[in-house]
Image (cartoon, rainbow, N blue to C red):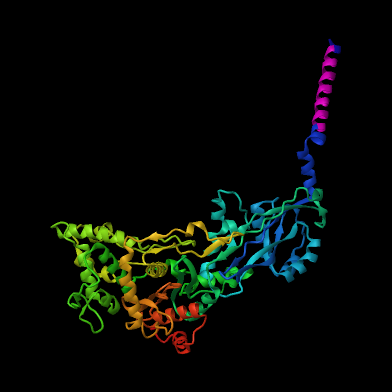
Amino acid sequence: MTDNRSNIIRVTFILIGTMFIIKLFFIQVLDENYRLAAENNVMQRLIQYPYRGLVYDRNGELIVYNKPVYDLMVVPREVVMEDNSEFCKHLAITPEEFEEKMEKAQNYSWYKPSIFLKQFSNEGFAAMQDLLVDYPGFYIIPRTVRAYPFKGMANALGYIGEISKYKLERDTTKYYRQGDYVGISGMEAKYEEPLRGKRGVKYRMVNVRGLEKGSFKEGQWDTLPKIGDNLISTIDINLQEYAETLMEGKVGSVIAIEPATGEILSFVSAPSYDPNLLTGRSYSEYYKKLSLDSLKPLYNRPLMAMYRPGSIFKIIQALVALQEGVITENTRLRCNRAIIACHGPHTYENLKGAITKSCNPYFVQVSRKMINQGVTDNTYEDTRIGLDKWRDHVASFGLGSPLGIDLPNEKGGMIPNVAYYDNAYQSKNWKFSNIQSISIGEGENLVVPLQMANFAAIMANRGYYITPHLIKAIGENKEPLAEYQKKNYTTVDSKFFDVGVEAMAEVVRSGTGQYRAKLADIEVCGKTGTVQNKDRPDHSVFIAFAPKDNPKIALSVYVEHGGQGARAGAAIAGLMIEKYINGCTDRNYMEDYVLNGEFIY
């Protein structure tokens, strides 16, 4: 009985021992995971960040490139440092800052690398290389930041920055990691995916002091980064720089478009900032300064600033009325100033004359004919029916909703509808006399400057537009992007546009635009606008295209508190057209007028 018990115990120990031997054999010989875990003690996995794609202007001029910088990374579990004072001295940080950064890294992960200090220059990198030999757990990885040879176009280009915790948590692609740089605004944000490229990985062997001993497995596991795609923009950088110069010291915008393609030639938001200052280690400091600036240089006015369109809206009113058949180009109406105030010596104009003279009473009467067509005997109901029809026409000109430009944060402005006035008056008892200010581009109408530049392009094309855009090609493909080939037609027949075009030409020949937008060798078509502001000076507005036949450029100019549209707006538009078509301007007196800015109240 005792021998049997002893045998059972012996067999049990033998079985247990055999199991351990088999398990050890499996761990040490068959299962590579454990072998690789041991090898990881002397192997570092380094992310290889790709170069971000470059950006060129329409003529091949480089406008955005990459500048090398270096991030200091830390793996907290590998750090051995009894006294950090010497380390802090070399990095120009305090011991308190060191502890704060280490705590942040530890909270992220004890085992994964994270950024300790970012964006060292080439000189800083060289100094750090020798220092890190004595500090295991720290190493350097190369990165790039954006650099700009031209100090303009910042609001269109946008900027890159470190990905926020909010965006990181919502990254469904799981591509990004803490410390990655992403496009925050402008083109950088809109075209983030093609620009960013694809990161690679490099494995290297290091000793206990962190010194590199060569590649791991002769680079068998390494993957090369894929450089981001380059962007070919629609911008003419020479015209862009000129427009930026003209808008110095002013608040507003200038947008120029090639009508036949919808390609944006110039995109100015004023005031702006030097995009080079939102890169490198000064990013946070300068961003805070920009954010606190009362003139809001980060605010993208061409897309986000909503203004009343003013008198330039009268052309749309004329076209809609022609389409509805309530007037003809020969319709004459008295300038009845008992209806609404007007300006200038005129009394009884036809349609072309009313546009040229910008007659307010004419267009209030035309709008009444358009909205109150007598469909019903009930004035209130008739107004509601007419307003809905009117708004559908106006919306076809790209007003009241975003156009779809390839930039984020575009606003759509507002063209009021029946629901808006029902809510405003808290009833359905409103009629044309309550809303007549919309007839002349005032009241509840709101547009963004891009929409009015696009309207100038519609006039140039005699009835259609191609969605305005800033990028014409991505990567090696030099062909225009397919999404920007569609013609968007208005609800107004093309035959009605001739009278509007001829009236715009007359505005510059002999009307309010003749003094500053008229050019000797180019026939310019334009329309002034003076946008009212309660208790503040008016905005100066001008839209134009040129030449009249086979147009090459269409644009809108907004100068806040610049007074009449015939002043700042017309002067800047005329100079822009002359610069683009002729390559230069010989009207130095007009440049001086604009640059001096005495029209600003």
Asked where in the image residue 543 lies, by quadrant, the reply is bottom left
Q: Is residue 204 left or right of residue 228?
A: right
Question: Can residue 206 be found in the magenta stretch?
Answer: no
Q: Quadrant of the N terminus?
A: top right
Residue at the (76%, 62%) spot, across then down? 83
Residue 558, position in %: x, y?
40, 75
Q: Is residue 592 above or below residue 113?
A: below
Q: Is residue 311 left or right of residue 25?
A: left
Q: Is residue 530 visible?
A: no
Q: Residue furthest left?
A: 377
Q: Is residue 577 visible?
A: yes
Q: Is residue 19 left or right of residue 268?
A: right
Q: Is residue 83 above or below residue 270?
A: above
Residue 114, position in %: x, y?
67, 56
Residue 538, position in %: x, y?
34, 78
* Residue range of the region highlighted in magenta in the rendering: 4-25
Asked where in the image residue 136 lies, by quadrant, the reply is bottom right
Question: Can residue 12 be found in the magenta stretch?
Answer: yes
